[in-house]
Image (cartoon, rainbow, N blue to C red):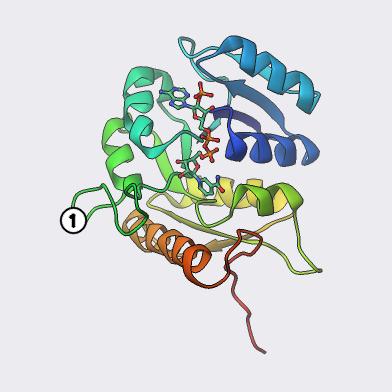
């Protein structure tokens, strides 16, 4: 069992909290509106509520806020995130979903990592799973793939174990700069929603042929 703090109270936070509780983890919900945090915790059952001005309790801290807020949230916590594994689920896409708001050659995860303490480890994960798909869990007998990227092998191993405990399949894609590719994969998914699939009830996965 791990101790997980989730920052944000929206659809990704709710789906991740629900699956984490089902996986037997201790879950702390952190939002800027304490009443909303308490309401979500009550709806989920066993989650506790943290506050934005106290250090997150979890060893794994999931950033489930819009990309535009993520670096500021990490900076505001400062040294309170020392030694934590920070899971970045954000997608730094622009308003019309045609590109990114991040500097050319960088990624949201790399930008967030620059705001984190040096001994915290950012792992990109979950950004290619729609919240509704994550909430519903494994589909038609197929595991849901969770692509991850990060520089620290131990942090990735912990996130991989966490993902497995949720009944999902971790797929390591490499070092943190691969987050750029994972964010492009999210852009691909948005393009599919807009131009061909027309809904979000699908996921990107790997079919390994024997
Ligand atoms: N939805 C998806 O299917 C999906 C899939 C993959 C990745 N993502 C990524 O996951 C992240 C969250 O998406 P979402 O759909 O869950 O968004 P959402 O439903 O809009 O929820 C965002 C949450 O972030 C909170 N928040 C915003 N700024 C904050 C701050 N400065 N401090 C603390 N909390 C803050 C909001 O608080 P308030 O309630 O107070 O406004 C809200 O609870 C985004 O980066 C998104 O790109 C989403």
Q: Is residue 121 above or below residue 49?
A: below
Q: Where is residue 109 in the image (x, y as percent from the top left)?
A: 35, 46
Task: Indicate the secondary structure of the residue bearing disc 1.
Answer: loop
Q: In this view, does 112 lie above or below 48?
A: below
Is residue 166 visible to us here? Answer: no
Q: Which of 171 and 195 is in front in this view?
A: 195
Q: Nearer the viewer, residue 204 or 151?
A: 204
Residue visible at 43% across and 36% down? 66
Q: How crowded is mark 1: few (under 14 residues within 10 Å), some or many (20 or more)?
A: few
Left or right placement of residue 178 versus residue 145 in this view: left
Point out the image quarter for the N terminus.
Answer: top right
Q: Is mark 1 within 8 Å of ligand 1?
A: no
Q: Name the residue under label 1.
A: 104
Q: Position of residue 35 (x, y in %)?
A: 63, 10
Left or right placement of residue 81 versus residue 39 in this view: left
Q: Where is residue 120 in the image (x, y as percent from the top left)?
A: 39, 34
Point out the image quarter for the C terminus.
Answer: bottom right
Query: Which image quadrant for residue 200?
Result: bottom right
Query: Which image quadrant for residue 122?
Result: top left
């Amino acid at each position: 069992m791990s101790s997980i703090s989730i920052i944000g109270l929206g659809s990704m936070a709710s789906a991740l909290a629900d699956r984490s509780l089902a996986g037997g983890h201790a879950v702390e919900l952190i939002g800027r509106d304490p009443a909303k945090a308490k309401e979500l915790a009550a709806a989920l059952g066993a989650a506790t509520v943290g506050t934005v001005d106290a250090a997150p309790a979890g060893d794994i801290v999931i950033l489930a806020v819009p990309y535009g807020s993520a670096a500021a949230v990490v900076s505001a916590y400062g040294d309170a995130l020392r030694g934590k594994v920070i899971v970045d689920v954000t997608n730094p896409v622009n308003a019309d979903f045609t590109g990114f708001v991040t500097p050319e050659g960088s990624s949201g995860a790399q930008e967030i990592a620059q705001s984190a303490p040096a001994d915290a480890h950012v792992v990109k994960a979950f950004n290619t799973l729609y919240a509704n798909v994550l909430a519903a869990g494994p589909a038609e007998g197929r595991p849901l793939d969770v692509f991850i990227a990060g520089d620290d092998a131990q942090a990735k191993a912990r996130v991989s174990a966490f993902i497995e405990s949720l009944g999902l399949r971790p797929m390591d894609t490499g070092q943190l700069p691969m987050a750029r590719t994972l964010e492009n994969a999210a852009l691909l998914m948005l393009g599919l929603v807009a131009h061909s699939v027309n809904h979000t009830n699908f996921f990107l996965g790997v079919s390994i042929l024997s």
